[in-house]
Structures are given as C-alpha cells and as structure tokens.
Image: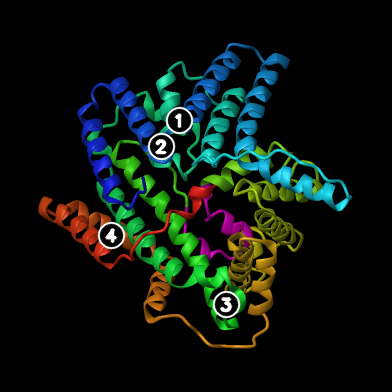
Amino acid sequence: MLFPTIEFAAFFAVVFAVTWLLNNRNDPKKWFLVAASYLFYSAWNPNYLFILFGSSLGNYLLALWMGSLPNGRRRKLIMWLGVTGNFALLGVFKYFNFFIANFANLLASLGVKANLPFLEVALPVAISFITFHALSYLIDVYRRELAPSKSLVDILLYISFFPHLVAGPIVRAKDFLSQTVRRPEPESIRVAFAVFLILGGLFKKVIVASYLSTNYVDDIFQNPTAYSSADLWLAMYGYALQIYCDFSAYTDIAIGAANLLGYRFPQNFNQPYRALSIQDFWRRWHITLSTWLRDYLYKPLGGSHYGIAWTYFALMVTMLLGGLWHGASWNFVIWGAMHGVALVIERMLGLTGNEGTRRLPPVIAWLITFHFVCFAWIFFRSQTFESALDYFRVMLSFQSFAITMSPLVALTFAFGALTQMIPDRMQERAEAWYDRASIALKIAIPVAVIWLIAVASPDGVPPFIYFQF
C-alpha cells in the first residue's frame, strides 16, 4: 500500500476518523492503531507479520527482564542477547545470501568448488527500520535513559506504527513512547504544517521523482554506454534530485500523517544539497539515520575520545556499516566508504564546523561537496560495480555532448532544484495564511492540489526507493 494511492487515501481517512473518535479512550485507540498498522504492513506480505510481532514481543520481554536487574554482567548479557537477536534477524533476511555468495566466490578463486545453500525468500519490507527501532528501545533501556514499558501495546505501536514503518523516519523510543501515555489534544495538531508536508511530499514523489526516474534517469543508468557524456552528467544530477525528492517525500508524508493522528516525528531532511561540507551534508540528509549511527555506533566505538587515529577509525567503521545497512551490495559499501574517507579528510584538513567552512569560499565549498555527493550516488544507484565504472568511464570521456532530455524532464529538474532553495519563512507564512483561511478554502486547496497532481502524474508511479532497504 503506497502513500500516493487511492487505496492509502481511503485507508487513512478511516484510520483518521476512528482514531479521533477513540481519542478519549487511549488504550483502545492504541490497539486500533496497531491493528491498522498490521493491516497496512500485510498489504505487502501477510506472511511476514510474524516478524513484526515477534520483534516487538521479544524486545518488550527482554527490556522488562533487563529493567528488573541491577547493573552488572547479567544485565549486559541480556542487552547483548537482544542486540544479537535483532541483528541476526536482519542478517538472515538481508545479508545471508550476500555473504554466502562472496564466500563461494572466494572458495572458487582458491580452486575449491562448493555447493553452498542460499535462502530463497523475499526480503521483508522495512526489515532494517524495524530492527533499528527495536534496537533504539532496547539500548536506551540498558543505558537507563528510558524505563522499560510495561505496556505491550505501546511497544507494538512504537515498532509497527504505519507512518514510519516502511521507510522512516527512525523515531527514538523515548520520543515516541512519551507520546503514548497521554491522549493528544485536538488543538495541538498543526493542521497547516501537516497539510503542506503531505501535499509537498506528493508533488515531490509523484511529479518530480517519478518523471525524472521513468523518463530519463533509469534508462541511462541501465545502459550508460549507450548515451553521451552530457547525458550521463545530467542523469547523475537527476538521480541526486530524484532520490532526495523520493525519500524526503515519504518522510514528509509520514511526518504529516502522524501529526494528523496526534503523534510528532522528528525532521528527517533539511535541504541537504545546500551543504558546505560532507559533515554538513549528514546533518541535513536522513537526519534520523545519521544521528542514530552517531549515538548507537560511533559514540559506543569511542568516537573522538581516544585520539585522532581512533576517531578516523570510528568514522570509517560507522560509514561502512551505514553503507551496508542500505543493502547487501559492495556498491553500498563503497558508497559508505567514500563518505567515511571524505569525513576523515575534512577532519584532517580542518574543514569541519563553522570555522572550517570559512577556510574555503562558500561557492567552492558547495561545489566540492555537491559534486562529491553526486559522484558517490553513482555507486549507490548502479546495479553492479562494473556498471558504475562504465558510467564514470563514459561520463568523464567528454566524447559526446548530445542530450536526450525532454523539455518535460528539464522542467522537473527545475522543480527539484527549487526544493533546495525555498526559505523556511516562506513555508511559515503559507502555514500562517492557511490557519487563518476559511473552512471552505482549507478543504478546497488540498483537494485542488491533489487533483492537479493526479492529472499531471505519469502512468504508474514507481515504488519509493527506500522500500528496498
């Protein structure tokens, strides 16, 4: 069930109405939202509902057990049991075949033939996000930053809540669970904020990302040697805009939908292509993932507390694993390694932080950062390492400058670029105006915008890119 569909609109309309009818009865409301979330997830594959429930129940029980113990070896052992179990679930479904295939290739290079078993199962949707949400809860309880919840329904809802279930944002347990113990007041709902997020997300996904993908970017990445250098440069920029508009659209709709139901999610994007350094980029791109990696991986590894060499090591491990989190492919590992190396180099040259950004003129810093991010996206988007190398070889040959881009795609390029330039105060003014508008206008505006998006949309909107992660 995709966000920009009639099916989801009907589903959300029912969920919205029932949720607010049950608002004065908090526990029944939460059980209803759990049921709705499980129905939402079952639209992809009902056979995997046991993963969703098993992860929730297992981490709920482990956290209760851990919370009943004093600090010591037993408490730490339970924490590691939970961490291992969560990563085992992720590893079996997402990485087992990857490691088996690479081990088989290693044996073959040594002249050893082996008939190794492969799992013939589909990757469960949202397995990475389910795991990260569960780990957030378990680790925060171990650190005593959060008391273990005695309410099973709260944990079931936290891990399965349908707005963030499939592709984030990654919501911390302590932030979400604090909202489940009380009922939200209708006056606290930021209607204008939610409406503009949802409408903007629909436009970015259905119009910008979809047209860039189906009318230009996909064909060029599928066969880069058949196109000119100019087309490959433009497709690289196009994919940068496509993945931003695609992924930020999902989280915008998720944040807006959750807000309308009375729950607040954290911001996940902040115009990342305006970044003046790679560190700045990661403060703007997929913010909930970068902060999760910082707090649950980089800092536990020691961060910057053990000298500069260890800091570089911790950065590299964090970004390598961050790349691998996106998928079982060496291209994702290379993508993560590129960002890790860039972060290390920035620290070596003193180019991080406010003082560092002043070492280079802002235009130069932006050009370097933006193009590095775009070059790294080539590995992220390419199906194989060889196809990525082919892409770079043709793109950097400058042998042909023929361009196959249509005027429609050029227009969507412009719309995508504008998403990085809209000042915050413009949205704030629009929200203030919408809040003051009449009921008729408040209904007419979203209806008209949705109708225009539906009319202008291409045939067959591709799934969200991050569904595969």
Q: Dot 4: within a 10 Å radius of its alpha carbon, few (fewer than 14), some, or many (20 or more) residues?
A: few
What is the magenta range?
A: 269-287
Residue 273 on the magenta segment: yes
Dot 2 or dot 1, earlier in sequence: 2
Which mark is drawn over residue 233? 3
| Front tag of 2 and 3 | 2
In the structure shown, which secondary structural element does the residue marked by tag 4 occupy?
A: helix
Q: Which residue is at a point 41% across and 51% down the rendered structure image?
A: 250
Residue with the most extreme right position: 110
Dot 2 or dot 4, earlier in sequence: 2
Amino acid on which the number 1 mark rests in the picture: Leu
In this rendering, position of residue 78 left or right of residue 27: right
Dot 2 or dot 3, earlier in sequence: 2
**Relative depth, front residue between 383 and 61:** 383
Amino acid on which the number 4 mark rests in the picture: Arg
In this rendering, position of residue 442 left or right of residue 299: left
Which mark is drawn over residue 41? 2
Which mark is drawn over residue 429? 4
Q: Position of residue 352 (x, y in %)?
A: 66, 59
| Front tag of 4 and 1 | 1
| Gap between marks 3 and 4 measured at Cα | 36 Å
Dot 1 or dot 3, earlier in sequence: 1
Question: Is label 2 in contact with label 1 (beta carbons under 8 Å)?
Answer: yes
| Gap between marks 2 and 4 measured at Cα | 36 Å
| Gap between marks 2 and 3 measured at Cα | 38 Å
Dot 3 or dot 4, earlier in sequence: 3
Amino acid on which the number 3 mark rests in the picture: Trp
Q: Which residue is at a point 50% across and 67% down the rendered structure image?
A: 218
Residue located beneath label 1 in the image:
49
